[in-house]
Structure formats: C-alpha cells, structure tokens
Image (spheres, grey):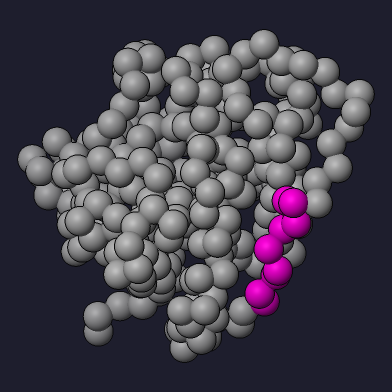
Amino acid sequence: MTYGQPFVGTDSGPELLRQAGLRKMLSALGWRVEDVPDLEFEALQLSEKSGTFEGNAKNHKLVGAGCEMLANAVEKTLKQKRFPLILGGDHSIGMGSLAGILRAQPETGVIWIDAHADLNTPALSESGNMHGMPVGMLMEGVAPDHRQIPGLEWLADGPRLSPDSIVYVGLRDVDPAERRLIQSLDIAAYTMHEIDRYGIGQVMEMALDHLCAKNPNRPLHLSYDIDAVDPVLAPATGTTVRGGLTFREAHYVAEAVAYTGNLASAEIVELNPSLSCGEGAEATVELGLQLITSFMGKSII
C-alpha cells in the first residue's frame, strides 16, 4: 500500500524484505512459512456509485478498499490459528490489520512502536494523509461515522479498539489534537522522554504490564513503524524525526515482546528505499529484516 502518504516507493518494501532473505531467516527460527503474494491493490475495482466525502482524507477510497482486503486476509489467517506477519507498505494498512485482528481476537492488546501517534481522523488531520489515521479510525470514542466515508463503509459496524488496549512506545512527533486525545482517553504512551528517563527495559516492562497484568495470556499485536528508529539508522522512510530509538533500543523492544510468548500478529511498515541513497536504503531494509527476526524469536543466546 502506498496510497496513505504522498511518496512513491513504500509498496516495494515487502519484496525487498523477501529478497534480503526473510523467508530463510524465519525458517531458521523454526517457523513454517507460507509466503502469500502481495495483495493486488493496483487491481482494486472502485464502485462508481460510491459518493464524495468532504473531510480531509486523501485517497480514502483506495486506502479503504485495500484495508478491507487486508482485514479479510488477517481475520482468516488468525481464525486458522496461524500467525499473520504483515509487511508494509505505509502505515495506513494498520486500519486493515487492526480491523481483522479485532474481528478474530477482540481481546488483543496492541503495542504501537512509532514516532507518531497515528490517532488522527479526517476531522482532525492537518495533512489528510491516512497513514496518520489507522489508530484514530478504529479507536472507541474517536472513530468517525465510516458510513459517510466512501471506501470505509465496511468499518461502520466493526469492533473498536478500547483506549486501554493500546500502548505507544517511541513517540516524539505528536499533533496537538492527538496529544489532547491521549490525555483525555488516558492512553498509555511512552515517549522518547520516558525512554531517556527510565531506560528501554523499564519502559517495555511497564508497557507489557499495562496490557497483560490482568490477563497474562492476552494475545498481542505489534505494529512497528520503522520511523520509530532514529533516521541515522533508518533513513529510508517517509516521515523521519531525529532523536529516535537506537539500534539496541529498537531490538530490545522487539525482543521484549517476543519473550512474552503472547505475540499473535505483527506488522512492519514505512520502509521506502526511494527516499534515501542506495546505502541508506539497504541499511533500512536490513534493519527491518533484523527487527522482524527479533520479534519472531531470534535471541542472542
């Protein structure tokens, strides 16, 4: 998916991860891998009867139709007792991932690793880019009336994400409206300030305790935006913000989630090799590959 933001190139991320050896590395960790081909977003047939929408949500028909395809695939995979590993693409695909997960496993806790809160809606967004909306579009008490947004009508009667079922880690670029929502909804959010103050170990302990204290066996979904990592290490992404996770902090996040044994689904998004030189693009893809293997079970010993 590349329609949720203004740059070309994010749709090449999955194939680059494959070429870098993802399947072989997952197999080496003991996983039996079914490599489902990329969803055919380019072939989407949009209804001529779908209406217009006056809100600020660019490419809402394409993003909505693509996310519906993804939601159906994720829901089917989970109901088959398999693990969906979702490769992005821009973070607008999170709408599809979350919708499918909540339909199949509504008790899931979400760990959102990102420089941004992605809590906008068409009524709140300044840019209209839908990669900044996947959480807001599913959040209880925040989500809009999807029946009024062509392409997103399928979300109208779906489950919603409870504010106490998500934890943010790594935030450092949050819009004013998102900041107010995080505070008013009492969403657990650990910014780079908390990571500096407490260290990544204690932050992850607090984050996981928030989600799993009452239910130690709660299924978890990890949504990992590569822009959570400092752009010195991951320059090939669309919305870089200085001062992000270090190499070891980024891996510790993945390792801590894997160690719970509760990870039931995961996605990695926003790798865009067209936004950096060849060396920077290669380094970003390699980091993405390493992070995937970390949350899929690779350990130092």
113 relative position to 37: left or right: left
- Tell me where the magenta segment starts and ends, as one range: 34-42
Is residue 35 highlighted in magenta?
Answer: yes
In this picture, is 76 found above or below 255?
above
In the displayed orientation, state which residue is furthest to the front: 277
Whether residue 51 is visible here, answered yes or no, is yes
In this picture, is 54 found above or below 81?
above
In this picture, is 67 found above or below 262?
above
> Residue sitting at 60 percent across and 27 percent down?
58
Quarter residue 186 falls in: top left
> Residue sitting at 82 percent across and 18 percent down?
51
> Residue sitting at 31 percent across and 48 percent down?
228
**Secondary structure that dominates the magenta span:** loop
* Along the viewing direction, whichever of 150 and 95 lies nearer the viewer: 150
15 relative position to 269: left or right: right
Name the spot of residue 201 as percent of width and height, x first.
18, 55
> Residue sitting at 85 percent across and 23 percent down?
50
